[in-house]
Image (cartoon, grey):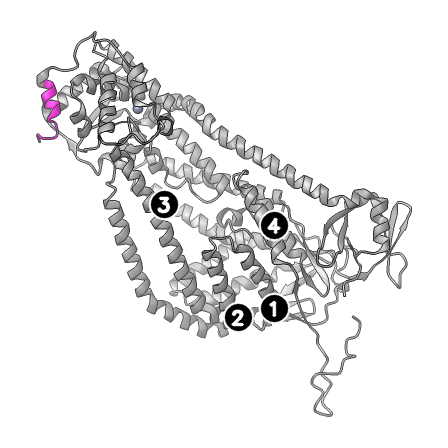
């Protein structure tokens, strides 16, 4: 480990030129086993039923523990130190506030005229707040995960305010909307820069200054493809709309209000029920198909863009004396994401561990760390540790990871 | 090659650990430094074990950061043999998992049963303290939502006859009262084949033309209307709205997201429990009797309904599956004698029967 410069230089071909120092490239190693991951997953699913899904916070934590502890860097393993209780309490706080607010608004809706400006303003306000919170959530979740990740006895951390970053995120989204999304690559990179520049491992701060120049060509090509296809998608939505209307014609409005009042059930009473069940099943199938189409499309069209983004971020990122790189190609990107979408959809979610396993291998393969990994300079930083988990993210993204 | 590791929690240095046991401590050193740290064994805990390497990850109870990763070795075996509490970490983790699981299963069951039963009674209590004015506005909202898509029959004579019937049946507490900003009960017939009747918050009663068609005497109709007025008198619509609201809030808090969704739609889906239906039947009978009307129409109507269901070949659902008391059961307990006046004159009954034909 203390042998920098002892290796023959890789660029020592031209005599007289200064010897290029050998710079080691290191990759993450993921050695988890799919079978073990599945076992955790199955136990989680089984425990979700009697706990009315509340187990999911502990389940998610077990999953993360496994993944972290089977990922190593330079021979040293990561450790996830978060707990299910932290996630659950974070989630509960957010949900109670959110549900109270949305019910409050809807009760208010009963007492004012349906088109009253107060109500419209409030509903817009709630939407606005929701969008804002999804930004805040991303920042807060990153902070939580960093503070709960331990490597060589040192944990990560994050400075800065999630609320302030959220405002910036909202403002940038607004700007890019004004520019017909043309400002989006620029905005996205600024937001990523902000998050990374506030991230720490021990007292080593990450630093980055990206440029969005390299992103514009793939982005504009992608957007062109979107514009061309938008007509097709529009037609599909129109068809779905028509079909929904057909379903509704078979279910006269107002009838369903009577089902529950049950003076008595009659044939006519029950049929609307069946129509509703049919309608719901139909909607679910349509939703899955729609999701498949949109996801596949987005992956294919924006693969080059996301790959360019990954290259830009890894090329410009520095942590302590370390630099980064990625061998990621659009092909590898597409195979990972398309593969995962297909696996999850066609196994009705039961293939999730396969997708997770593939993702871990994908990440390990595609992140390279350039430089001598020597932690003796990095000391514990004791940055503020949030008490609760990713409540916001948890509330609006009930993913299993 | 994996090897024993010690991380001191102060810097991210990986020490190649060499350990030895010294009394009740583990002494951690390296090839260069014989003693880097000394951990009291009582302060040690096992964080996890790695199946791939066989390494056990030790930490300290008093400090969250430092870690000691030991592969299988005679020293580790000696440590575990001497301090079996360390070796039992897995059993403890499983125990903890079970207790967390049990606690939340229990919590889940309590929440579920609490929601199911608690809200029924709790909402009955709450419904009694909801101001009448709120109920009026909620009712106006629902009334608009339901009747907006349907035709209301306006046959003049029929309307007047129904008005008189409703006024006779209305108990004093629901009568028009300007001082308490009460409007009294409204009644509307809507043009719909499906035989049904509905009571809405804000004291609105709806009857479908299909139901009037099915009734062979005004007393049957009076029975149905008395039942609906009884729902209003017992404040069932508000109770059901409150209980639905509570259930949907609980569900969306537990499951996340906003299944609290469209509360307004939810409020209009008013479902009554068996108990509420039975209460309304009995209270309805009381209303008929105190109005001096014949009370046998209600039971007769249940019989007519049962006949219709049989002839439609639609009695497949066992009784207990439907959330209302069975029709023959209801016909049974609402049985009444023929004492009392008939609800309408023949002429009035004719205008009611034709209420949807005239404009
Ligand atoms: Zn009823």
Q: Which residue is mark 2?
A: A332
Residue occupying image coordinates x 63% and y 45%: A387
Q: Nearer the viewer, mark 4 or mark 1?
A: 4
Magenta highlight range? B348-359
Q: Which residue is mark 3?
A: A121
How far apart, in angstroms, are the residues tagged by discs 2 and 1? Answer: 10 Å
Residue occupying image coordinates x 24% and y 49%: A246
| Label 1 CA crowd tier, 10 Å (few <14, some 14–19, many 20+) | some
Question: Is B358 included in the stretch rendered in magenta?
Answer: yes
- Report whether mark 4 lies on the same chain as mark 3: yes
* Viewer can see residue A159: no
Residue placed farthest to the top in the image?
B339
Q: Nearer the viewer, mark 4 or mark 2?
A: 4
How far apart, in angstroms, are the residues tagged by discs 4 and 2? Answer: 28 Å
Q: Element under label 3?
A: helix
Ligand 1 has an atom within 8 Å of the beta carbon of the residue at disc 3 = no
Q: Which residue is mark 1?
A: A365
Mark closer to the chain start, 4 or 1: 4
| Label 3 CA crowd tier, 10 Å (few <14, some 14–19, many 20+) | few
Which residue is nearer to you in this view: A351 or A9? Answer: A351
Which residue is nearer to you in this view: A254 or A338? Answer: A338
Q: Element under label 2?
A: helix
Q: Element under label 1?
A: helix
Mark closer to the chain start, 4 or 2: 4
How far apart, in angstroms, are the residues tagged by discs 2 and 3? Answer: 46 Å
The chain letter under disc 3 is: A
Task: Pinpoint residue B253: horizontal percent, then vertical percent.
Answer: 49, 39
């Amino acid at each position: 480990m203390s042998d920098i410069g002892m290796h023959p230089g890789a660029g020592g071909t031209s005599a007289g030129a200064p010897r290029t120092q050998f710079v080691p490239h290191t990759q993450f190693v993921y050695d988890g086993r799919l079978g073990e991951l599945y076992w955790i997953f199955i136990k989680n699913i089984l425990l979700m039923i009697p706990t009315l899904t509340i187990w999911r916070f502990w389940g998610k934590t077990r999953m993360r523990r496994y993944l972290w502890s089977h990922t190593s860097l330079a021979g040293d393993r990561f450790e996830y130190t978060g707990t299910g209780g932290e996630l659950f309490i974070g989630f509960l706080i957010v949900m109670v506030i959110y549900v109270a607010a949305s019910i409050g608004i809807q009760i208010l809706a009963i007492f004012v005229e349906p088109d009253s400006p107060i109500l419209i303003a409030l509903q817009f306000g709630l939407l606005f707040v929701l969008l804002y919170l999804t930004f805040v959530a991303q920042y807060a979740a990153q902070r939580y995960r960093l503070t709960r990740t331990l490597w060589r006895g040192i944990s990560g951390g994050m400075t800065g305010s999630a609320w302030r970053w959220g405002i910036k995120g909202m403002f940038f989204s607004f700007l890019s909307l004004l520019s017909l999304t043309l400002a989006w690559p620029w905005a996205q990179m600024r937001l990523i820069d902000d998050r990374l520049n506030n991230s720490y491992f021990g007292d080593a701060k990450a630093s980055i200054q990206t440029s969005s120049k390299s992103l514009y060509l793939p982005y504009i090509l992608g957007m062109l493809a979107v514009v061309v296809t938008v007509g097709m998608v529009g037609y599909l939505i129109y068809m779905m709309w028509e079909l929904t209307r057909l379903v509704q014609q078979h279910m006269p409005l107002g009838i369903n209000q009577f089902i529950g009042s049950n003076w008595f059930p009659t044939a006519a009473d029950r049929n609307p029920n069946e129509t509703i069940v049919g309608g719901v099943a139909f909607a679910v199938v349509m939703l899955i198909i729609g999701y498949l189409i949109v996801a596949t499309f987005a992956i294919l069209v924006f693969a080059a863009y996301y790959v360019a983004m990954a290259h830009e971020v890894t090329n410009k990122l520095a942590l302590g004396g370390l630099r980064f790189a990625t061998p990621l190609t659009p092909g590898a990107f597409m195979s990972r994401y398309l593969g995962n979408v297909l696996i999850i959809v066609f196994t009705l979610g039961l293939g999730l561990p396969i997708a997770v396993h593939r993702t871990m291998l994908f990440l390990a393969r595609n992140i390279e760390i350039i430089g001598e990994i020597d932690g003796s300079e990095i000391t514990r930083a004791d940055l503020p540790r949030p008490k609760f988990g990713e409540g916001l993210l948890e509330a609006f993204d009930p993913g299993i990871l | 090659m994996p090897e024993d590791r010690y991380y001191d929690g102060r810097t991210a240095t990986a020490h190649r650990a060499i350990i030895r046991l010294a009394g009740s401590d583990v002494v951690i050193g390296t090839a260069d430094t014989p003693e880097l740290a000394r951990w009291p064994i009582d302060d040690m805990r096992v964080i996890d074990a790695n199946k791939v390497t066989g390494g056990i990850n030790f930490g300290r109870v008093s400090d969250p950061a430092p870690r000691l990763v030991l592969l299988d070795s005679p020293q580790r075996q000696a440590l575990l043999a001497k301090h079996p509490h360390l070796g039992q970490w897995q059993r403890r983790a499983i125990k903890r998992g079970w207790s967390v699981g049990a606690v939340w299963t229990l919590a889940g069951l309590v929440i579920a049963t609490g929601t199911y039963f608690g809200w029924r009674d709790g909402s009955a209590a709450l419904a009694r303290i909801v101001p009448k004015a709120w109920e009026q506005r909620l009712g106006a909202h629902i009334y608009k939502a339901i009747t907006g898509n349907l035709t209301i029959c306006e046959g003049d004579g029929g309307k007047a006859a129904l008005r008189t019937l409703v006024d006779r049946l209305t108990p004093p507490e629901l009568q028009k009262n300007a001082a308490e900003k009460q409007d009294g009960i409204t009644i509307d017939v809507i043009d719909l084949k499906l035989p049904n009747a509905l009571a809405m918050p804000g004291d609105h009663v709806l009857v479908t033309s299909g139901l009037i068609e099915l009734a062979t005497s005004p007393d049957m109709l009076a029975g149905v209307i008395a039942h609906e007025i009884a729902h209003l008198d017992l404040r069932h619509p508000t109770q059901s709205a409150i209980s639905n609201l509570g259930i949907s809030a609980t569900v969306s808090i537990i499951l996340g997201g906003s299944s609290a969704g469209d509360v307004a739609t939810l409020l209009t889906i008013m479902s009554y429990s068996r108990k509420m239906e039975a209460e309304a039947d009995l209270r309805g009978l009381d209303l008929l009797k105190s109005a001096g009307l014949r009370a046998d129409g209600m039971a007769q109507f249940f019989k007519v309904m049962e006949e219709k269901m049989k002839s439609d070949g639609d009695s497949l659902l066992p009784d207990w599956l439907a959330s209302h008391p069975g029709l023959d059961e209801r016909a049974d307990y609402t049985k009444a004698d023929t004492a009392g006046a008939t609800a309408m004159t023949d002429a009035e009954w004719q205008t009611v029967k034709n209420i949807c034909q005239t404009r």
